Amino acid sequence: MQLETLKIFCDLVETKSLSRAAERNFVTQSAVSQQVRGLEEKFKRRLLERMRGGREVGLTEEGEVFYQESRQIVNAYAQLEERMRTLTGTVSGTVHVATVYSIGLHELPAVIRRFMGEHPEAKIDLEYSRTTRIVRDVLAGTVELGVVAYPEKKRGLSIIPLGGDRLVLICPPGHPLAKHKKVRARDLNNQDFVLFERDIPTRRATDKIMRAHGVTLRRVAEFDNIETIKRAVEVGIGVAIVPSPSVIDEARVGSLAVVALAEAEWTRSVGVIYRSDRTLGTAAKKFIQLLKEKK
């Protein structure tokens, strides 16, 4: 039995997905299935069972025992690799990072380029997801670091604050609010709004601030993607509130008017989350250091 087989099994358990386990280990889904069958044949135990109509996999009672022991072996080997890299002073290995589009597209590229330039033997494996899924994946161990907005304290998670971004109002250049340098929350009463979907932290923060100021918004559209929101505002569907780094390019070319929000609470906190019981590797620590320097 090879260590790679145990890692594939652990990844399959933690992602609950053949496709994601295969992608993470650069093999086919068929290869993942074969590895699991080989383990079950070797130990003469059924380790996995299908769940949710066959779309996900779960552990049997025997599989839970096998997973716990396998995870310890995989973690121990990863720690061994990290110790050996530390002895040589080399920063290498892959840092698995998950983030939301508004951060990943507009704030991480420069940091990743610098990281890769300073540590050419290391790699950042970046994926985009919703905050709820990022938290779940970090807790499951399939992602080492999550970079999210409005990080919330949760059992099993550690948070490294990175500072914050100002939220701004965006509207078409011809909109009546576009001529203002700054607007207050009450100025937005009964405006047509393009909003993030309700489970996205920036949307929850926006709703909370608006309620505190007695403001009513006319919701005309909801999206989960910052780029879609910007395009909807550009064509005149409504106005929106977004993080300022996400509209630097549009402000420069004049495709959107970017208006400051007056109240102090229009700030979006950003932070790195990781599993509390995991020791971060050197590469992950170096990446976090660069993120903190940028902020």
Image (cartoon, grey):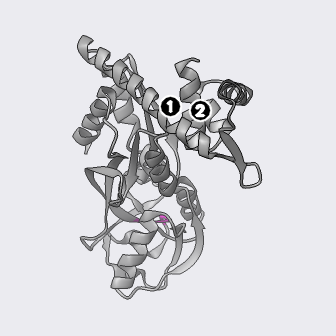
| Secondary structure under the numbered disc 2 in the rendered image | helix
| Secondary structure under the numbered disc 1 in the rendered image | helix
Amino acid at circle 2: Phe
Amino acid at circle 1: Ser
**Neighbourhood count class around disc 1 (C-alpha, 10 Å): few under 14, some 14–19, many 20 upward:** some
Q: Residue at x 38, y 44 (%)?
A: 107
Asked if one can make out residue 196 in the rendered structure from this viewpoint, the answer is: yes
Front position in the image: 211 or 235: 211
Q: Say which quarter of the image contains residue 72.
A: top left
Q: Position of residue 68 (x, y in %)?
A: 49, 38
Q: Position of residue 266 (x, y in %)?
A: 31, 68
Q: CA distance from mark 2 to mark 1?
A: 8 Å
Examine the rendered structure and indicate whether residue 153 appears above or below residue 281.
below
First in residue order: circle 2 vs circle 1: 2
Q: Which residues are magenta?
A: 169-173
Front position in the image: 43 or 194: 43
| Majority SS type along the magenta span | strand
Q: Residue at x 35, y 48 (%)?
A: 273
Give the numbered dot on residue 70.
1
Residue position marked by numbered label 2 in the rendering: 9
Q: Say which quarter of the image contains residue 15.
A: top right
